Image (tube, grey):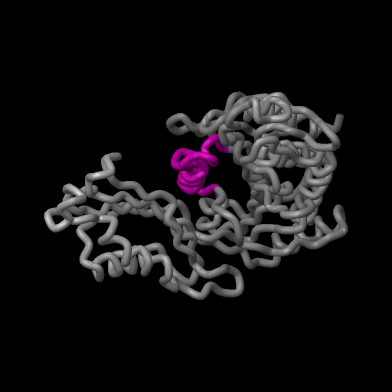
Amino acid sequence: MSETLELAKALIARASVTPADAGCMDLIVECLEPLGFRAEFLDFGDTRNLWLRRGTARPLFVFLGHTDVVPPGDPAAWTFPPFEPHVHDGDLYGRGAADMKGAVAAFAVACRRFVERHPDHTGSIAVLLTSDEEGIATDGVVKVVEVLQARDEVIDWCLVGEPSSERVLGDVVKVGRRGSLNGFLRVFGVQGHVAYPHKARNPIHQFAPALNHLVNEVWDEGNEHFPPTTFQVSNLSAGTGAENVIPGQLDVRFNFRFSTEVTAAELQRRVAAILDHYGLDYEIDWRLSGEPFLTATDEIIGAVQRALREVLGREAELSTGGGTSDGRFIAPTGAQVLELGPVNATIHQVNERVAVADLEALTAVYERVLENLLLR
């Protein structure tokens, strides 16, 4: 059994449903601490965060990942128990295999191999892990970044192990992500009997024209790196449950995935203008999950593309698609941030899995990236 596979199985066997770590980080410390990595736990609330660094000089290269996983759902729906890792037909099954314990194992082993072969490398290497990525991400990487900035620890390059690949390992690398802005809207009406609508005010009916406007609004045209900004309603609820009562209020949850062509503040202003245009009585709360970011610097992109060519014989498509990642907290510090990880075909699904061969190949790619950047 390869080192990466063995470590990935050990990680999967720990039921670290967000925000639990369940001892996963301790395994990474055991792997790297003997090689001069200094472990520091920076815990906030129920979230465990690990900052594991070797060296003090710049440039600083960071592998970023998370040990928490989404709930597995009904274990009976799985071919193999979700927290009992199992290799079948060349795939490693288990919750977190692809998102992202496989990548965590790969970059931990890559760090160990690199340091054993090149103990006098330039700069520093660090591993940053959190157990708060699959949740609301309020006590994870965002808090660690505040600590690092307060003590002037500057990250130069950050490689996130999120499952970026689409069809085969290394075919897509994420060079940025769209921003994510969440809104909670409450539209007020007047409750009443459905037989006497003139004595009530139906907030659903009032909101309908505004919703049509929001759905069909062109928020921007996107650009060469980002698709146009999108608006999506994720939840809509009203009523008492009775069939003869006009509801007194309507609750709507929605999300913007936005490009660098528009700001969160601008989106908020434009939404308010649309709601006001239709004369709605409403209140709205906003939560910004992350600003959009883009890494356009050839340095880390070149190092990753070269590693992919040398190990896998391919170059990656550069993409900003998909959801958010913890890279959004690192990018504002000025670091160059890329995401490269396993194929994402089964993430968050029943029977989540990753190809065993990809784990070893990904380890080799990560090690080659370190060589390309820290052997000068």
Above/below status of 18 relative to 319: above
**Front residue of this view, candidates 314 and 129:** 314
Q: In the rendering, at what x and y percent does residue 237 appear?
A: 34, 47
Residue at left 69%, top 25%?
A: 81
Whole-percent x, y for residue 62 in the image: 64, 47
8 left or right of 190 in image: right
Count of residue discs: 0
Vertical comparison of 262 with 290: above or below: below
Q: Nearer the viewer, residue 364 or 255?
A: 255
Question: Residue 375 at x, y = what percent?
Answer: 79, 53
1 inside magenta stretch: no
Q: Seen in the image, is 138 located left or right of residue 276?
A: right
Which residues lie in the magenta part? 130-154
Q: Quadrant of the N terminus?
A: top right
Q: Is residue 134 left or right of residue 58?
A: left
> What percent of the width, then of the height, locates residue 128?
60, 41
Kindly identify the residue that appears in the image at 79 percent across and 46 percent down.
362
